[in-house]
Amino acid sequence: MDSIDKLLSELKAEYHKPANSPSKRTEEVEKVKLDSSPLDSSLFTSSSGKKDVIDNILSQVKQDFERKELLEDIQNQEKIEEERIKQEQLKAKQLEGVKKQAQEWLNKLEPLSPEGLWFETFAKNYNSQLEAAIEYLQAE
């Protein structure tokens, strides 16, 4: 008897042992059965030959690995997207803080003081005084 046929028959024999005398091997097989998708029982009873049985088993294992890899890829992409969103939220929060600080600085700025006159000239290159104040305060 071929070694693969022998192994398959041993697994089949252990799997079909009575419940009142479970062996350690049977318990391991049951655990594996619960933890992963079970093999199609038609693979063991197929009359298409040993090669087809092995090909079917290998194909099923390959599909399981591909599904697991795809799931891991999706989970990694979700983590990356969540991190990107957190970073954008943090930047937006920081920008709001800087805007508030710049607005307070503008409110305190004396327009006719030397700094106010200088800032007036500086702000001409920007769309708004707030934008200029943000740039000025970040450069300090």
Image: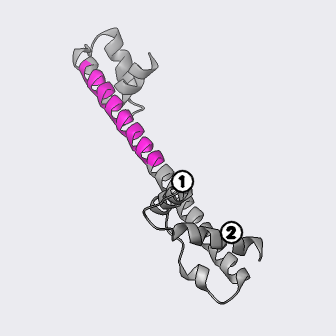
Label ID, residue 7: 2
x and y percentages locating residue 84 in the rendered image: 44, 43
Kind of residue sitting beneath label 1: Lys
Q: Which residues are magenta?
A: 79-104
Compared to 64, does 81 lie above or below?
Answer: above
Compared to 67, does 85 lie above or below?
Answer: above
Compared to 80, does 62 lie above or below?
Answer: below
x and y percentages locating residue 28 in the rendered image: 53, 56
Q: Nearer the viewer, residue 127 or 70?
A: 70
Q: Nearer the viewer, residue 40 or 86?
A: 40
Can you identify the residue that label 1 sits on?
Answer: 24
Side of 1 relative to 72 (left or right): right
- Is most of the magenta stretch helix, strand or loop? helix
Side of 111 relative to 60 (left or right): left
Q: Most extreme residue toward the bottom, as rendered?
A: 47
Side of 91 relative to 17 (left or right): left
x and y percentages locating residue 60 in the rendered image: 59, 72
